[in-house]
Image (cartoon, rainbow, N blue to C red):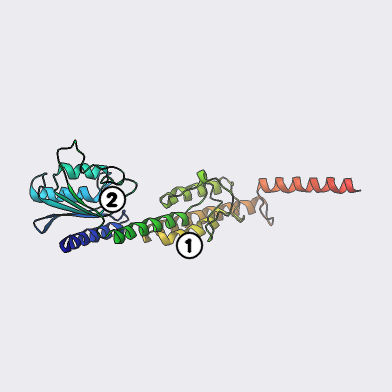
Amino acid sequence: MEADLDYLRAAIAEAHLAEAAGEVPVGAVVVHQGKIIGRGQNRVLRDSDPSAHAEVVALREAGRAFANYRLEDCTLYVTLEPCAMCAGAILHARIARLVYAADDPKAGACGSVLAVMNHPRLNHRVEVHPGLLADECGTLLTSFFRQRRQARAATRISRNGKAPMTTKKKWSAKVDTDSTHPDEGLFNQSASAIAKALASKKVSPKGPASGMRMLNFYINRAGKNLSSERHAELEKAKDKLSAVIAKQKAKIEKQEPGKPHTSAKSATKKAAKKSVSQKSRAKSK
């Protein structure tokens, strides 16, 4: 039991490394005769590989150490219940024992959703020991996904760039859920769309929802959740938009010197409102 705890903590260390790299924090180790022969952590995003789960990465390393894909008499320790893909790999590798921490109610293949390890029609059985250090590993995963949701919420904007999220996490303008960017990885596309809108005068450079104000909001709040390198990219986008706005303002001043700029849409609304007001006064007389 004590040895199982030590090896599972080694798997947890791998999970923390995955988390530091922006991956879902799952780690695994393969042990043979008291020695770790394979270590793995989630590498799906870094390797652009849907099969690069912690268990599979650990099994690959162990197979190279063994010079054989059959890992008989080995134990696999993993922080999360294996999925169907990983369960299949574990069976194919002829792993003798599996020790895992937290259950996976959405994709677990060791009893939570499927029961692959001891299926009567398969030609191999795995001795499964679930629940060891479950609270610690479950908390690690819960915390990771909570932080990721918060990071996404803080970076949402409307597609037209007019509705940044306020500090109360409510929209400052009514927009449909479908017209939002939930992924902060789209900030470059958003900045490009704002620049085009400004260039085509679809957004007033002096208006309360101007592209520059939106981008300032984006940098100050969303930038906290981005790497310094990507934050620098946002600053570059801001500089480009500043140039676009300055150029547009100069053009407007040249066309109408001394007059404040009002968008065509705003002018139409004011004219309609004035007309209604005049009609109301005429009726009252």
Q: CA distance from mark 1 to mark 2?
A: 27 Å
Across and down, in percent, residue 261 comes to 66, 53
| Disc assigned to residue 29 | none
Across and down, in percent, residue 52 comes to 24, 47
Across and down, in percent, residue 99 comes to 20, 54
Q: Residue furthest front?
A: 120
Across and down, in percent, residue 143 comes to 37, 59
Q: Which residue is mark 2?
A: 46
Q: Toward which corner of the image does residue 113 lie, by quadrant? A: top left
Question: The residue under label 2 is which amino acid type?
Answer: Arg
Looking at the picture, does residue 72 appear above or below residue 166?
Answer: above
Looking at the rendered structure, the secondary structure element under dot 1 is helix
**First in sequence: mark 1 or mark 2?**
2
- Point out the frontmost of discs 1 and 2: 2
Q: Which residue is mark 1?
A: 220
Q: Residue at x 14, y 38 (%)?
A: 123
Q: Residue at x 59, y 46 (%)?
A: 202
Question: The residue under label 1 is which amino acid type?
Answer: Asn
Question: Considering depth in this image, is 208 or 90 the residue closer to the camera?
Answer: 90
